Amino acid sequence: MQIIVTGTLLGGTYALIALGLTLQYGAARIMNLANGETLVAACFVSFWLFTATGVNPLLGMVVIAPMALVINWLIYAWLLRPLVRRAKNRGMLEVDSILATFGLLFLLQGLMLLGFGGAYFSYRFLAEPFLILGEPYGLNRVVAFVAAVIVASLLYLFLYHTRQGTAVRAVAVDPASARLVAIDVARTAAFAFALGGALTACGGTLLSTFYTFNASMGVIFTMKALIIVIMGGVGDVRGATLAALILGVTETAVASLIDPGLTLAANYALFVLVLLFRPQGILGRASA
Amino acid sequence: MMSLRRDELAVAGSGIAAVGLLSLLPLFSDGFALSFGVNLMLYVAMCTAWALFSGPTRLVSLASAAFFGVGTYSVALGLDSLPFPVLIAIAALSSAALAGLVGAATLRLSGVYFVIFTLGLAELIRQVVAWSQSRFAHKMGLYVFTDFTERDLYWMLLALTTLVFGVGWLINRSRLGFALRIIGDDETVARHVGIATARAKIVLFMTSGAFIGVAGAIVAPRYAYIEPQAAFNPMISFLVVIMALLGGTRRLWGPLVGVIPFTIVMEFITARFPNHSSVVIGITFLAIVYLLPDGITGLIEGMRDRIRRRTAAGTGIEAPDAIEEKAA
């Protein structure tokens, strides 16, 4: 029981990170391997806000999310749009974007290593027990989960109940047809990429409240987010949320029952199962 | 039997001459130059092997560190009981088996799954190895003591590199190589003309993985003490990709052109600015994507074609020559 609750609380934050990536890959068609770096950067900014100026991380999110939106929009406009223009087909764009975001990954990671060194950081925020079904859990984890649920619900409302959100979903399904119904595909893709970055940054801010982070851990989180996105089906918001919860629970179960050093192995086991049995995602339909 | 054309004979001849010259290096130096030579040869072998698969298929494999580590561990685990050549064979077979498993799980699906899977593969195997060592053997690393000197390792790596080039050349001439070029250009077309695309890719990935595993096995004695952190260092995968792409993967000798300058630069960076290596790697990746999409060899060939075309257009007389040259 304790494993399921802890895993679900963790899965909430994972869901936000993966939702960011699924928007970037599903709608903007950019396989962003530097996604984890956005997350780590958000961790550091909220760390700095909290320790230097005493700003509550939840309030900090209000600053961090728009900042990440703008920065990711600039990254798309300057770095990635030339690649989108150059690519003759989706496969070429995939290879190019993987290599370009790879470069970005190393560049950002290198800069953060220069700035903060390889040490681990953490800060104490709401580190007090909170009882669920008689068992104590960290209040910061519970608060992070609730915040993640709120942000994810806002995203859901946006995607399914507004015109702009519908445009994002249309571009995710078929960019060529989206143009026929007067959607500005280039702008929508840029917006989806930026929004994805903002979501990941929210995830990072929440993660930093209860997790010890360092400058070079981005890749591991990118990996987790990628596995979640594939499990949930590319571009599928509901699938990604479900997959994030499954991953959170599995990871917690393996860490507490077998060995904490085997969490990646647990992720891979899920990944292989999905690839073998449901490569279209747990909620996805087989493509024609 | 295959018949060799005159220019192929010339290339083969100069290749043999180059190998002969390179094999003399340890006789002149056994200090810094030799150790640098071992590094260079190691990456030439690994990058060329990487490009065997990733060049024609355009699937970026980040599994090199995993194969390298499997190779190193094959030697470290069996050194007390088996002779070294047998261990090399085991390294080749187990790396090929690993590549086969990865290929079977991912190469039937879209390319992105393959990239993602290989991205974490080395870290995954490192975790499993570290866990089983602490669980069953109660120690973190293994000792590798051999009589091999740096000179022996250099010669072995040179032999491996020559073998990789030979195999790569044979594959290019074979039906498999032709099939892979079609797959790389357009996978749908390849499937329509009756190529078993998944099988061709898996076979080639296994070949490439086996060579990288052997490279890991050969340099294992260099470490003396092997632990999972060092053997499965993900940086190996990234360096292999970056050097091969810098050189260009369209020609067999392309990666070679990338390895030499980049190894020199990295040697300089790690010595002078050890904290900046990530930034340098990042910038190089970006530079390759935006400035050198076909690598240095692609750039050189593009320039050569342009010059040839310009001279042909300028005089109008040399044009038939240029065409004849291409047809020859």
Image: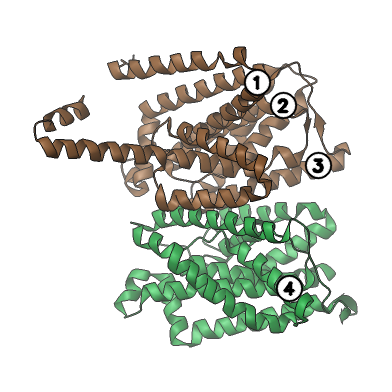
Chain colours: A green, B brown
Q: Locate residue A204, reporting x and y percent.
A: 68, 70
Residues at marks 3 and 2, CA–CA distance in whole angstroms: 24 Å
Kind of element beneath mark 4: helix
**Are dots 1 and 4 in contact, CB under 8 Å?**
no
Q: Locate residue A41, reporting x and y percent.
A: 65, 67
Q: To which residue does mark 4 refer?
A: A48
Badge 4: chain ID:
A
Q: To which residue does mark 3 refer?
A: B132
Please name whichever residue, B123 or B153, is drawn nearer the observer in this view of the structure. B153
At 63% from the left and 55% from the top, the residue drawn is A110
Q: Give the mark toward the camera: 1 or 4.
A: 4
Kind of element beneath mark 1: helix
Q: Give the mark toward the camera: 2 or 4.
A: 4
Instruction: Name the N-terminal-most of marks 1 and 3.
Output: 3
At 43% from the left and 30% from the top, the residue drawn is B253
Badge 2: chain ID:
B
- The total number of labels drawn is 4
Kind of element beneath mark 3: helix
Tell me if I can see residue A12 in this picture. no
Q: Amino acid at mark 3?
A: Ser
Badge 1: chain ID:
B
Instruction: Name the N-terminal-most of marks 2 and 1.
Output: 1
The reply to the same-chain question for discs 1 and 3 is yes
Kind of element beneath mark 2: helix
Q: Amino acid at mark 1?
A: Leu
Q: Give the mark toward the camera: 1 or 3.
A: 1
The reply to the same-chain question for discs 3 and 2 is yes
Residues at marks 1 and 3, CA–CA distance in whole angstroms: 30 Å
Tell me, for residue B153, which label it has, or none: 1
